[in-house]
Amino acid sequence: MRAVTDRMSYSIFAVLVGGILLSQAIALGLYRTDRAEAVAAAQSGQLAGCLASIAGVVDHQPADIRDKMLAGLRDGNFKVNVAGTTQDVSLDVYEKPKVNPPGPHHTDMIALPPFGTITTPPPEPKYVMASHQLADGSWLNVHIPMAGADALSEPGFLASLAGSAAVAILLSAWVLGFTTRPLRRFAAAADRLGVDMNAPSLDETGPREVRLAAAAFNKMQRRLRAFVEDRTRMLAAVSHDLRTPLTRMRLRAEFVDDDGVREKMLEDLGEMESMIGATLAFARDEAAQETLEPLDLNLLLSRAAEDYRDAGKPVGFSPAPGPVRVVGRRTALKRAFTNVVENALKYGVSADVAVAVQGETVAVSVTDQGPGIPEAEWDNVFRPFYRLEASRSRDTGGTGLGLSVANDVVRAHGGEIRLENRAEGGLKVILHLPLETAR
């Protein structure tokens, strides 16, 4: 039941199908009632004519001849006889016309002057009886079975009823799919926008409401893109304006006689330049302009680990079996993994990278031998420019953008980063990314 109510299309389809089946049941009940009354009325009229014809022939005939004539009319279904009284019907009767319809246990008595009466016990009478008083005072009684009035007993009726219901249900399913398709398109477009700001715009086609929603979504995408571009231009202008006074300060620092003061000034200026460069790289995010392409993570990470080992840095790598394909931006993903590995080398001496496939995602773990990170700080370390240590030295504290950039890149690819402190010591950073087949 949860699976049905969890999706809007299933819920609407269930309501439509329930409404169709309920309307079919009501229509069938009304049809059966009307049909039974129509069949009873038609057969009563036929019986009235038959009774009149028989009475016209046998009336005024001698009793022996009349009995022979009636014997010739009798068969298994049609019964006729002459008796001193009318047929005994042990049901309440009333004479038409009546204002109120008959109740379920009344017998409908139809007046047929001057021939007599016809009685039909509803509902769905199984027989019809008619009586006519002859000239000698005796009664001519006729008894025939009622023709089948139940539509369900007719060949092909249930098949046609089920066929019409099936057609209505299939048509409802098609209309429902056509109606909810724009919602799926919006969901896919929103997911693409979270990964690629320059994703193609939605087609503004379809019903008026869908066109308006698509136009609003496209306008929102253009505004977000313009905001990011304006922010990048502003930061580039600030960087340009800051580099000129920094250059003048560096030239002036060279003329300071005190070697200790001069070195500290140059170190501070270098840190400022590094922070400005890192800030620009973070804000500009040039890798976001890359084209999405299929990538083999095993191959990408093995080459990165090999580059580290060639530089004499202890970085191990354990690949997953076979190729591990994701859709992403090569430079951006390499930057994210490099930032995490650099953190591990800086604070944990060594880094071990491992790739493992987990269902529709791939998990890349980077473990180190460092002191780990307090759990209370896990959310903070992903904030831009946040550093756990108070040191402002580039050699120990960095700029505080490494994990923030890695987190942004992974989230832009539809993944997430988790942190774990290992029981044996050290930190494990796990980067989850969707596989190519999951997109």
Image (cartoon, rainbow, N blue to C red):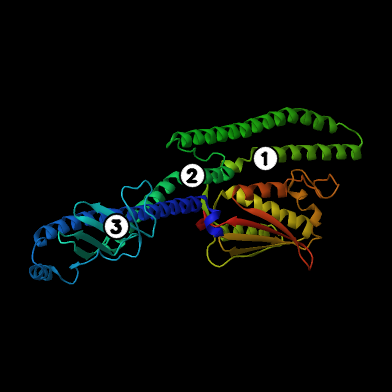
Taking the spot 22% from the left edge, 57% from the top edge, the residue there is 43
Above or below for 275 versus 140 = above
Q: Mark 3 Cα within 10 Å, few/some/many (few <14, many 20+)? A: few
Q: Position of residue 234 (x, y in %)?
A: 68, 29
Identify which amino acid the numbered label 2 is placed on.
Answer: Arg
Q: Is label 2 or label 1 in front?
A: 2
User: Label 3, label 1: how many angstroms apart (C-alpha)?
Assistant: 70 Å
Q: Position of residue 115 (x, y in %)?
A: 19, 55
Q: What's the mark number on residue 160?
A: 3
Q: Secondary structure at mark 3?
A: helix
User: Label 2, label 3: how many angstroms apart (C-alpha)?
Assistant: 38 Å
Identify which amino acid the numbered label 1 is placed on.
Answer: Ala
Quadrant assignment, res 154? bottom left
Q: Which residue is disc 2 drawn over?
A: 185
Q: Earlier in the sequence, mark 2 or mark 1?
A: 2
Q: Earlier in the sequence, mark 2 or mark 3?
A: 3
Q: Position of residue 105 (x, y in %)?
A: 38, 60
Q: Which residue is disc 1 drawn over?
A: 281
Q: Earlier in the sequence, mark 3 or mark 1?
A: 3
Above or below for 362 versus 256 = below
Q: Is label 3 or label 1 in front?
A: 3
Q: Secondary structure at mark 1?
A: helix
Q: Secondary structure at mark 2?
A: helix
Looking at the image, which is closer to me, 220 or 409?
Answer: 220
Q: What's the mark number on residue 238?
A: none
User: Label 2, label 1: how many angstroms apart (C-alpha)?
Assistant: 33 Å
Q: Mark 2 Cα within 10 Å, few/some/many (few <14, many 20+)? A: some
Identify which amino acid the numbered label 3 is placed on.
Answer: Ser
Q: Seen in the image, is 128 located left or right of residue 16?
A: left
